Image (cartoon, rainbow, N blue to C red):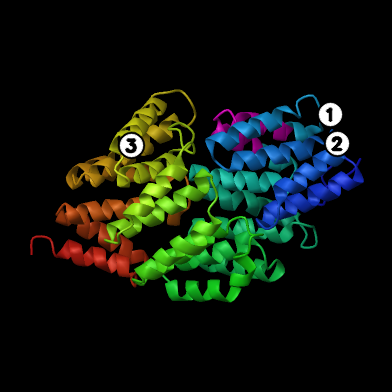
Amino acid sequence: MLKDAQGNPVTGATADSVAHYDTALRAFNLAYGNPMGGFDAAIAAAPDFAMARLAKAWLFFMSRDPVMIGRGRETMLTATALPMNERERAHYAALDLATSRRRVSAVGALDRLLMRFPFDILAHQIALLSDLALGRSRWMRDRVARALPQWSKDRPGYAPLLGFHAFGLEENGGYAQAEDEGRTVAEMEPHSYFAHHTVTHVMEMTGRPEDGIGWMAAREALWSGTQNANRDHIWWHKALYHLDIAQFDAALAIYDGPFLSAEKPLANSLTHASALLWRLDTLGVDVAERWKALLQRWAGHADGKTLAFADLHAVMAELRSGQEAAAERRLAAMRESAAGSDEGAPVYREAGVPYAEGLIAFHRGRYAEALEHMLPARFDLFRIGGSHAQRDVFDWTLTEAAVRGGIADVAVSLAHERLTLKPRSFINRRFLRGAEGIGG
């Protein structure tokens, strides 16, 4: 039986189709190249190649976009009648769960699959990104950590796998080791998104914006080209560095230029736009017309039931575009999801809805009310998914609400929390000045 580059047997394939599959999977692992085109080529070369169809379905699902998830399910179903081995059937079962809004169960299925097949790098990446969407940082680190001792450094895919581990370390606060591993992978695979992204995150989380800007500038040729599928996200990170050193014009120039050029019509990408404009907005930068354009791009990409993280960012665009009625309709849909029986219901109930209510109150200038919604829910905020850096926009809003509302004890406490992590941050020092000026 033919095998993929990592040594996993595949059914229904030919030598040519496996070559296309391996190229596509490598492109997905690195986020560099055209994985969808590669999987399509593999299917064209061998229509009965089940794993190529399943991998393509996973790509659709990982967009976290309602429309694309539906296409993922359609693609998965085209493999239903094809011969599959044990590993491939396990992928099919996990996809069935994932595309039925049972993401937690899907990751559980992938976790078990990887105990049996530790060289399945596709399952590693899907599980990692799914746990990122669930806010479960520990498993992002530990699932890869248990497999790495079984991999040799010369097995194809080792460097991307180490990059996954580096990112998991970063999300768990293991910043020094994460940076070391990220830099190692960057030497092994210069185009690796996870290598560059991990070091970028470390510098963001440890308050090193100048180092971050330098790191990005030195490697810009490697990450800014059209082959990099996630360059929009990296540009977003660069804009955050500029905010932290009070270079608002530079951040806005990134948004208007390279970020928008790279933005994808998917929820994942649109959340970056909302989060950056919301930060700039709270800093007093006039971005009103940009909000209106962004709201149009959000149409159809968040539905109040698929992903609370996306819904909250869509609410930002609705509010700041003057479409409060649309935000209220989205909140109603989120409340319906919170009351439902889907696996995502607790996320909407315990974090999504309270933060949507808080954003609406904040927008209306009801800052004490915003705190009432968001402050108790902050302990469950991780459940909406995203990285620590991505979720920071909500902590930012919480702190801003306390300052604007004149609630001194909360404002001072939250400002010091932020300064403990990033003492040189202009943003955090601005919060503390505002907090200490309350009642003065």
Q: Which image quadrant is residue 69 in?
A: top right
* Distance between mark 1 and mark 2 Cα atoms: 7 Å
Q: Magenta includes 388?
A: no
Q: Which residues are magenta?
A: 90-111
Q: Which residue is under mark 1?
A: 83
The residue carrying pointer 3 sits among few (fewer than 14), some (14 to 19) or many (20 or more) residues within 10 Å by Cα, namely: many
Q: Position of residue 225 (x, y in %)?
A: 63, 64
Look at the numbered disc 2 and give the secondary structure of its residue: loop
Quarter of the image containing the C terminus? bottom left
Main structural element of the magenta stretch: helix, strand or loop? helix
* Contact, mark 1 vs mark 2 (Cβ under 8 Å): yes
Secondary structure beneath label 3: helix
In the rendered structure, which amino acid carries the disc numbered 1? Answer: Pro
Q: Is residue 366 left or right of residue 385?
A: left
Q: Which residue is mark 2?
A: 11
Mark seen at residue 52:
none
Which corner quadrant of the image does residue 80 belong to? top right
Which residue carries the number 3 mark?
327
Amino acid type of the residue tagged 2 in the rendering: Thr
Mark 2 or 3, which is nearer the eye? 3
